[in-house]
Image (tube, grey):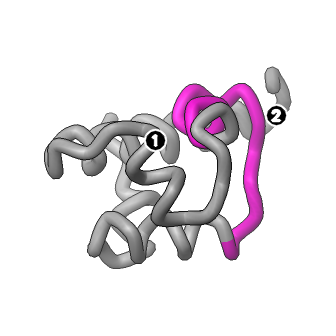
Amino acid sequence: MKGKNFDIWLSVGLNILHYRKEQGMTQMQLAEKCNISRTYMQKIETAACSCTLDTLIDIADALNIPLKKLFEFKD
């Protein structure tokens, strides 16, 4: 997914990866908590595709973090 918002999706994906790893969770474990496939989770983390806001809310809930944490980008 190389589009005009690719950098934003990549930052969101990296944040998901960071919080997932911080909690010692695998992609499969997080995907199962969100009722999505591991492949789809991998694509979200790598910005290979975008997802809905509902999916981001599910991911934040599964990671026990506020949704806004997924949008805190580092320079």
> Dot 2 surroundings within 10 Å: few (below 14), some, or many (20 or more)?
few
Dividing the picture into quarters, in which one does residue 57 lie? bottom right
- Residue bearing mark 1: 28
Coordinates of residue 26 in the picture (x, y in percent): 33, 38
Q: Nearer the viewer, mark 2 or mark 1?
A: 1
Q: Amino acid at mark 2?
A: Lys
Residue displayed at 66% across by 55% down: 36
Q: Is residue 57 left or right of residue 22?
A: right
Image quadrant containing the N terminus: top right
**Residue 52 is a magenta residue:** yes
Residue extending furthest top? 2
Tell me which numbered mark, 2 or 1, is placed earlier along the sequence: 2
Q: Which mark is residue 51?
A: none
**Which of 70/43 is in front?**
43
Q: CA distance from mark 2 to mark 1?
A: 29 Å
**Which of 18/2 is in front?**
18
**Which of 53/42 is in front?**
42
Image quadrant containing the C terminus: top left
Q: Amino acid at mark 1?
A: Met
Which secondary structure lies at badge 2?
loop
Coordinates of residue 13 in the picture (x, y in percent): 50, 40
Residue displayed at 39% across by 69% down: 62
- Residue bearing mark 2: 4
Which secondary structure lies at badge 1?
helix
Q: Is residue 19 above or below residue 9?
A: below
Q: Is residue 17 above or below residue 36?
A: above
Q: Magenta region: which residues?
A: 41-54
Q: Is residue 49 above or below residue 62?
A: above
Coordinates of residue 24 in the picture (x, y in percent): 16, 43
Residue displayed at 75% across by 45% down: 50
Q: Is residue 21 left or right of residue 49?
A: left
